[in-house]
Each structure stands twice: as C-alpha cells, then as structure tokens.
Amino acid sequence: MENATASLFRARLVPGLILAAFGLLPVLAGLIDDTFIVFFAIRVMIFAIAAVSLALILGFGAMVSFGHAAYIGLGAYTVGILAENGVWEFYVSLPATLVVCGLFALVTGAISLKTRGVYFIMITLAFGQMAYYTATSLSAYGGDDGLTMWGRTEIFGSSMLSDRMTFYYVVFAVLVAVWWLCRTMVNSRFGRVLQGARQSEMRLQAIGIDPYAYRLAAYVIAGMIAGVAGALLANAAEFVSPAYMSWHRSGELIFMVVLGGLGSFSGAILGASGYLVLEEVLSHVTENWRLIFGPFLILVVLYGRGGLLGLITGGKRDG
Amino acid sequence: MKRALKVAVAAAALGMSGLAAQAEGLKVGFMATLSGPPAALGEHMRDGFLLGVKEAGGKLGGLDTEVLIVDDELKPDAALTKVQGLLERDKVDIMAGVVFSNVMMSVYKPIIQSETIMVSANAGPSPIAGKACSPYFFSTSWQNDQNHEVMGKYAQDQGYKRVVVMAPNYQAGKDSISGFKRYYGGEVVDEIYTKLGQLDFSAEIARIADAKPDAIFTFMPGGMGVNLVKQFSQAGLSDKVPFLSAFTVDETTLPATQDTAVGLKSGSQWSSTLDNPANKAFVAAFEKEYGYAPSLYASQGYDAARLIDGALKKAGGKDDKQALIAALREAPFESVRGDFKFNTNHFPVQDFYVVEGAKRDDGKYIVKVVEKVFDDQGDAYAAECTLK
Amino acid sequence: MSATLLAVQTLNGLQLGILLFLIAAGLTLVFGVMDFINLAHGVQYMLGAYLAVAAYGVTGSFWTAMLLALAGSLVVGLALELVVFRHLYDRDHLDQVLATFGVILFLGEAVKVIWGSSPLSLPVPDLLSGSIPISDGLLYPVYRIALIVAGLLIAALLYVLVTHTRVGMLVRAGATNAPMVSALGVNIRRLFMVVFGFGAMLAGFAGIMAAPILAVEPGMGDNLLILAFVVIVIGGIGSIRGAFLAALIIGLVDTIGRSAATDIARLVLPPAAANDVGPAIASMLIYILMAAVLFFRPSGLFPARAG
C-alpha cells in the first residue's frame, strides 16, 4: 500500500521535474558555459511537442499514425514557403500553418478513420508518403535539396526569435501550453469519450455518441500541434527539407512515444528526450552506436513495461 | 529525466576534456554520411581525408591535429545539430567533408556565419557556387553540374544524335539533367525520372530499348546505380547502347557491379590511372592502408586534407584567419588530379575526363581514363558569385 | 506506348510483383498466424542476401550458397525467436514494433561492421545466365524467368501447406482463434516457432533470389519492408492469396505507372511541369492505390479474420 502511494507520488512528481529541468536548463548551461546544450534542448523540445501531439491520438485514442511526420513537414514548408515569398510575420505564418495542417488532417483523417489497427497505421503512412513525394518534387522550393530560410519568423517586425535564449523560452512556452492543452482535453468530456471509444465503441453508440467525430477532432488537433512543431523546427534549423516528413521520421515519433510510456504526456516528453539524448551521447561513444541502441530498445520493451516513465515510477501513470 | 540529464552532463564533460587536451592543436570537424545505403561514399571520403592527415604525421600544417568525425545520417536537421555541436562545444577550427547537397545546404549557413572555414570534399550545390558564395567556403571536388556537363560534351563530340536521359526524381537528379543538356545539342528523345532508391529498372530499360537511342545518359548514385548497371547489362543493352553516366560507375559501386560495368563511361575529374606523381603515391598508399581501391570521393577527401595542410603551412598557423583564407585561395598543394586552382567562387578550376569501368591486372575493378574532355574548366555559376 | 512495349512492361510488372510476394509471404504468414508485427522481416531478407554472398565467397557455387544461406536464415530466425520475439507474442502491437525496430538497428549495424557498407553482389548462376530476345533490341534474362517460376512455386507450396496439411490446418485455426487451439491441446509455442522459422526462411530466400539483380547493401530491406506491408495490407492481413494478388497488382500498377505517368502528364501540362508532376505521381501511385483500397475495403481485399 505504501509502495503504491509512493509511486503515485513519483508519477505526479515527474511532470513537475521535467518542466523544472527544461525551465532551468539554460541557467545550468550558462554555469558550465556550454551554449550547445541550449541549442540541442530546443531540438528536443520541438520533438517533444510533436511526440505529445502523437501521444494524444496514439495513447488516448489508439490511433497509431505512421504519417505524423507529414504534419511536421507541412508546418515547416508553410513557414519556409511564406518566407521565400517575403512573408515573415508570425501572425500570418502561424494561422497559415494551423489551417494547412488542419485541412490536411481533416481530409486524410476522415478517410483514414474508416479503418482500424494495422490498416490505420498503413493508410496514414500512405498519406504521409504522398506529402513526402509532393515536397520532393517542389522544384521551385529546392525539391529534395531543401529550402534555406535566410532568417527567422518575425513578431510584429521584430526578429527577437533570432536570439537563442528568447527562442528557447518561446519553444518552452509552446511545449508547456501544448502539454496543458492536451491534459485538459484528455480530462474533459471530450477526452473521456475518446478513451471510452478505445475500450468499447458500441457502448458509446448505445448512449448516442458517435465516436468517429471525436476521433476525427482529436486527429485534426494533433495534426495542427505537430504542424506548430514543424514551424518551430523550420525556424530552429532555418532550413526546410522533405526529410522532415520521411516515413523514418514518422516511425521515430512512434518509437519516442512508446519508449517514454503510453498513455501519458510526460511519457511522450520523456521518450523524445531519452531517444534524442541517447542518440547524441551514444554516437559520441562509438560510430557503431546502433549496436548499443538497438538492444537497449529491446530491453526497455522486455523489462520496462510502461517505457521510461514506467521505469521511473514503477508502473503507475498519470495523464 | 534525471537519468537523461546525468548522461548529458557526462557527455559534456567528455567533450570538454577533449578540448583541454588539444588546446594548442588543430581541430577539424569532419562530417560524412556514414550510415544507411550511401555510407560507402562517406567512408571513402573519410578514409581519404584520414590518409592525408596521417601522411602529414598527424599534424596538418605542423599542428597536432584532431579529426572529429560525425555521421550526418543523411538527415539535414540532425546534421545541423551535430555541426552546431562541433562549432560551439568542440570549437573546431575547420570543418570539412559532407557528401550530400541537402546536408550541405542545411549546415552551410551556421558554418559560414560563425566564420569557420569549410572545405567541402564532395557536395557542391549551385547556390553556394553562385549567389550564396562565401569567402569561408572552399571545395576540393566540383560544382554539382560539372561531371554531368562532361558527359554532355562527350555525347556532343561523339556525334550522338538521339539520347535518352535518366535520373532519380530529386533535385540532384534534375540538376544532373540540366548540366548534361548545357553541353549537349542533340535531341533528347526521352527524359526519365525514377523513384529515389528504386530497385527494379526493367520498366525503364524496356523504354530505353524501345526508343533505340544512340546513347543513354544517367545519374544513379550508390545502390541504385548498382541495380541499374546489373540490370542494364543483363538485358543485353550494354553492348548496344553506349552508357554514359556520372557518379554511377566508380570504385564504390564497382565491387558490386564488377564485369557488368566494364566499358561503361562516366564523367570524372579524377581516376587512379591519372599519371602524376602525387596520384601514384596516393593510390599506392591508400590501397596499402585500407586494402581497397580508392574512388573519386577518396581522392577529394585526400585533397581536402592536403589543401588544409598546405594552406596552414603557408599562412604560418591557424590564428590569422584572413591570412589562412588567402593561403587557401592559392591552393598550395599538389592535387592528385593534376592541374588545380581556385576560381573566384572557391570551386576548383580543373580538367575533366571521360573514364570507364575496367578490371585491373590484380583483379580489382577501377575506372580508367578514356580521354580528356575539358581543360581548366570552371563552373557555370562562378559569375553569379560576388567574391573577387 | 507501343503494344510490344506494353506487353514487356506487363511482364516486368508481374515480375516485380512476384519479388514483392516473396518478401511479403513470410510477413503475412507470421502476422496472420501469430498476430505479431515483425519489422525485422526486412533485415532478415537482407541477411539472406548477405549470407548468400558470404557463402558464395567460400564455396564458389550459387546453389550451395543458397542452401547454406537458407540454413543460416533459419538459424538466425530461430535464435531471434528464442531470445527476443518469444517474449513479445502476448504484448501490445506497439511493444512489438519498438522491440523489432531495436532488432533492425542492431542487425543493420552488425551487417555493416562485418561486411562493410559498399554494395556487394552475387553473380547469376551459370545455369540461369542466358537471356531470351523478347523485342527488338531487348533481352529478357533467364534469371528473371527463374525468379517468376520460384515465386509461383512458393505460392503453390504455401497454398498446399496451408489448405491441405495438418500444420496448415492448425495455422489457419491459430490465426482465427489461438486460445481455442491451445485449449485443444496443441502446443501453440511450438507451432509458432515452426511458423516463425518458416517465415524467416522465406525472407532469407527472397534475399537470396534478389541478390543477383539488386545491390546487396546495408538498409536494402528498409524500403522493401514498407512495400511488403503495403502488399499484405492491401491483400488483407494473414491471407496468402490476398498477398499474392496484391503483390501482382502493385507490381503492375507501379511498373506501368512509372512507364506512363510522365507521358500522361505531358498531355495536359507543359513539359517542365510534367517532369515534376509525372514522376511524383508515379512514386505515390501505390500509396494512392492503398488508400483507395482501404477506403472501400477497410480490411483489405481478402480479410482473413472475420470481424
């Protein structure tokens, strides 16, 4: 009994710890005079945002999207193409990103959600690949070579995002906001329907709720959030490439969410951080780091039920 | 997260200890694609570079040299993160390498903005040669279009009236075709764009056979080239239709294509059969060190190391960056390709050849020179570059 | 496009379909019977090709190399089953995906460490090295005909095994209701091991057969794995018949599409735009096909499981 309480406590503690860690990281980096950590953490947080959006549909709606990277790419290309045409303002590019990603998610989601399980995985892959091949054939915007942005998105004419610290805290704020939004949604009636649909669709239909609409709404919201991550990625790299939406990247996002622990947003953030940090650290240790990383993933699955979060909290989860 | 942080801190400590040990030496960040199917290109280039460093006694320009090799995994955004790490954490003095143009385009801006000297040992995308050129950027390879231009000129000189061109459907493929057409005036009867990473070419081969062209020009790097060459030969076309290519028949693919690639033509600025003392010494030393025949990528990596070595010696160290840039511009080294000087855009002015697959007496497969096509050739974009 | 060319392209399409079927067969068998998503199927295919190249280097005979590589594929497959996969059968699909991805990373890197990253190749065996003229100026390699025959034989063998033998009956029963089969006293673990070993050999066999026409290189299985999944999903998971038909359809659509998409685009668009749009459409065609099939038949063409 005591153990259970302790682990529940730890489960509650994890989100706070993660937030504190990301919030204080630039200060710590300043202390040891390592500016690269900040740069790297920006990338981690951007993928954490994308992973949280995937966790929303994957962890709570059992929709395993294997085309989620398409939204990162769409968001990035929206910002990149607007910039190439001289539009740098965030109040244009942000709504544009949301509209583009929302529409793409609405159309493809409406079709994809007719399928279940592995069929859903594959049909989302199909749409992701279509987006990928479209991007590679955009000769006017660099095609496969990608598109260099000669600057960052501006906020009312100010190029404050070019300052690394400012950009860091903007990304951090987006991460916190997205996390809060997703948690609130999951704990609302909307979220309960979504999770209910995962368990028993028939029961919901019996009480007059059509889970399809709820699923579609969640899918569209997740797509839009991933699009925001893409817009941030374009700004962080000041470069846009079709590689952002290859199926490998979609796969990585799934791995991040599963690695962190399903059914929790802290897990998704933990998974994205763990995945990227391990990749970075191991690749410094040996060129053949996959020889270590591969078995590590297997071991996490075999012995760490509940992913990295499960390892820390002893199996208890919290939304 | 605690766990993750601990490792991150450990990694930081690792990076810093490296820094302390080499405070007086030279740090070179070397980026190459070392995983996935195109890894062979990156390994050739890396091995060539490391041989150059080794021959300088581990001291480029007399400075204790540490080469930090990173794998870009052919992911432009991951490459960018790694380059930032090299620039900010490892504080490298010089960046070198990079196989693919999309990776180069993503890392180019932060490198030149940090005023770090970059020596490309392969990728040469047109913006960097033209409008976006930089005093900090140097190339020991070519501008992307050039080896294709060689084949365009060759097809023109051979009097081929009707040619089919084929390339993968991505930017480098399209650049390749436009490079070919720049010097070819005959009729292009068919332009075929294939999927990137395509395995089976029988549909395209049937189309080529149907069109009955005087020659085919293609650009199929890596495994795609292996698939195409084998299938082209198995379909009996290599005896009938002259096969002109770029980056398709070279020492990275010949171990797999072997006899099927013998006699197939390719455009190149280098071959192991080029007759100059620097090249002979390089080829012998390379094969002794690594046990396989070097490719043009290896020669470019080697030249990059030799260029850095020569320029550092001439500038008297790494501290005066402007002096070092001035020294680099003079290309103070013996290139294994023979004639070599820098254009205004810091891309080479050099000779280009038609080479073909051949089997050497010792059983190894190499490309040998057929004829010289261009003499002291610069690229088409240098005029757009504002450097003087 | 002339009629001859169309005929040649149809043959090419069927042959690509057969190659896809060889890879997809093992995947759909394992997936259908064991409800196990094995992403490592692609590296098992790659391993088959590498083992054949290595064995050829030692023995100098294609046929001995094939036997050795088949045995090697079986051994590796069983070892993987014993060490990793066996513990994943009762897990969530996502756990299986993550763990088998770990296997991909490990084996892919191991292959690179052992054999290097330059592409390798396996020569066509002398017996099958000839070619037949099929149209003016074009030869059709005998080896490719052999590939088609091998694919058809495998399809026939699987058909007979699944529908006319006791193991096949158990396999079908296991695919429909594994707990029930187990309750009837069948050793389901052993059945799974047999099925998995067989699937591993099928993957290896596909790799061996592909080695003489394709580059043997690290990562050669990655894209094919995706194609194989497209095949089994269109066909209906677990259905050998579905996989066979879907593979042929995809082979045909992909080949004809590659051959004709740009021409068709040139009819309606200016040449420069057609060169952009045509190949992009050709690349997407199989995915468009898959989306369309799943839209109208959400469980594929031949759903093996009812409900």
Image (spheres, rainbow, N blue to C red):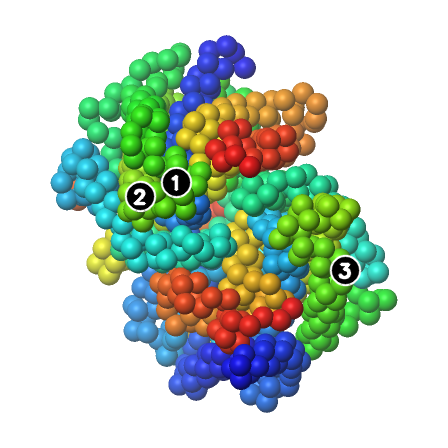
Chain name for mark 2: C
Which mark lies nearer to you, 2 or 1? Answer: 2
Chain name for mark 3: A
Give the residue at the far front of this rendering. Answer: C184
Label drawn at residue B229: none
On the rendered image, what quadrant is the C terminus of chain A found in? bottom right
Callout 1: helix, strand or loop? helix
Q: Please name the residue that numbered disc 3 is placed on.
A: A189
Horizontal arrangement in the rendering, residue A270 relative to residue A298 (left or right): right
Q: Please name the residue that numbered disc 1 is placed on.
A: C174
Q: Residues within 10 Å of mark 1 (few under 14, many from 20)?
A: many
Give the residue at the far left of this rendering. Answer: C59
Circle 3: residue type? Arg
Dot 2 or dot 1: first in sequence order is 1
User: Residue sitting at 14 percent across and 44 percent down?
Assistant: C58
Q: Residues within 10 Å of mark 3 (few under 14, many from 20)?
A: few
User: Residue sitting at 79 percent across and 65 percent down?
Assistant: A154
In this view of the protein, which residue sits in the foreground, A242 or C34?
Answer: C34
User: Residue sitting at 24 percent across and 34 percent down?
Assistant: C123
Callout 3–callout 2 Cβ contact below 8 Å: no
In this view of the protein, which residue sits in the foreground, A223 or C115?
Answer: A223
Label drawn at residue C186: 2
